[in-house]
Image: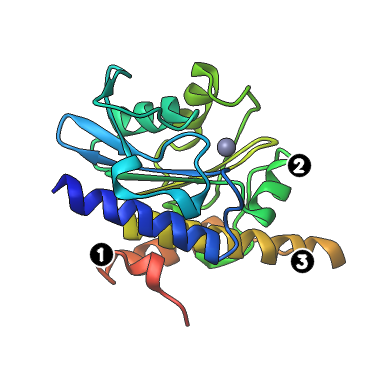
Amino acid sequence: MSALIREQIVAACKKLESSGLNRGTSGNVSCRENHHFLITPTGVPVEEITPSKIVSVGFDGKVIGIGKPSSEWHFHCDILKARPEINAVVHTHSPHATALACLRENIPPFHYMISVAGGDSVRCAPYALFGTEQLSQHAVAALADRKACLLANHGMITLGRDLDEAMAIAVEIEALCQQYLLARQVGRPTLLSADEMAQVIERFKTYGRNAAASHRT
Ligand SMILES: [Zn+2]
């Protein structure tokens, strides 16, 4: 099991890089495995990441075996502890999500696909220094009832029941941020009402697993 998850994490890192969501050593990926989690190593360029370099960390924050985990291991650990239904966490500094995060605004329901995150907004967590427990607390709070949040002046986090879902939501959130930025350049987008968003969320429920993340009309 561990070998497969390690390979999936490496593949996800490569996809984040090739799709432009990550550059260099920014961004990181983790997956739950029984009573610990696997996470990308710190400071390793994506072309050098191999399954054996993925680091195993206990929920007490102690490394199991060898390696040094991503400097953001704290929020990966706390999110996986706080959200038993979540098994994968993706963090990126993707350009459009990060640009919006620098405005420190929640993303409102300007497009129905905002419901991909599980509600009628994507919250922006307050700023805190990277790698800190405070940033982790802000992230867990901003992610309540959601599978995505922005981190002020930093980037975004997405969650999934599995890595495929967390990755699909990351791609969708980056696209939504791009669309929202474009709309804001020429005007003030008309927002969907609470009723309209409730209808979208209800419709997605009937589509089944991963429906929102894979849905495009
Ligand atoms: Zn970061």
- Identify residue type, mark 3: Ala
Tag 1: Cα neighbours inside 10 Å, few (<14), some, or many (≥20)?
A: few
| Ligand 1 positioned in quadrant | top right
Residues marked 3 and 1 touching at CB (< 8 Å) = no
Quarter where residue 202 is shown: bottom left
Tag 3: Cα neighbours inside 10 Å, few (<14), some, or many (≥20)?
A: some
Tag 2: Cα neighbours inside 10 Å, few (<14), some, or many (≥20)?
A: few
Q: CA distance from mark 3 to mark 1?
A: 30 Å
Q: Residue at x 40, y 27 (%)?
A: 68
Mark 1 and ligand 1: say if the CB distance to the nearest ligand atom is below 8 Å: no
Query: Residue beneath label 1, please?
Result: 209
| Nearest to the observer: residue 77 or residue 125 | 77
| Nearest to the observer: residue 37 or residue 99 | 37
Q: Residue furthest bottom?
A: 217
Tell me residue 43's x, y (percent): 53, 36
50 on left or right of 97: left
Secondary structure state at the residue bearing disc 1: loop
Q: CA distance from mark 3 to mark 2?
A: 15 Å
Q: Mark 3 or mark 2: which comes first in sequence? A: 2
Residue 177's disc is none
Secondary structure state at the residue bearing disc 2: loop
Residue 103's disc is 2
Quarter where residue 104 is shown: top right
- Identify residue type, mark 2: Leu
Residues marked 3 and 2 touching at CB (< 8 Å) = no
Residue 183's disc is 3
- Tell me if residue 188 can be seen: no
Q: Mark 3 or mark 1: which comes first in sequence? A: 3
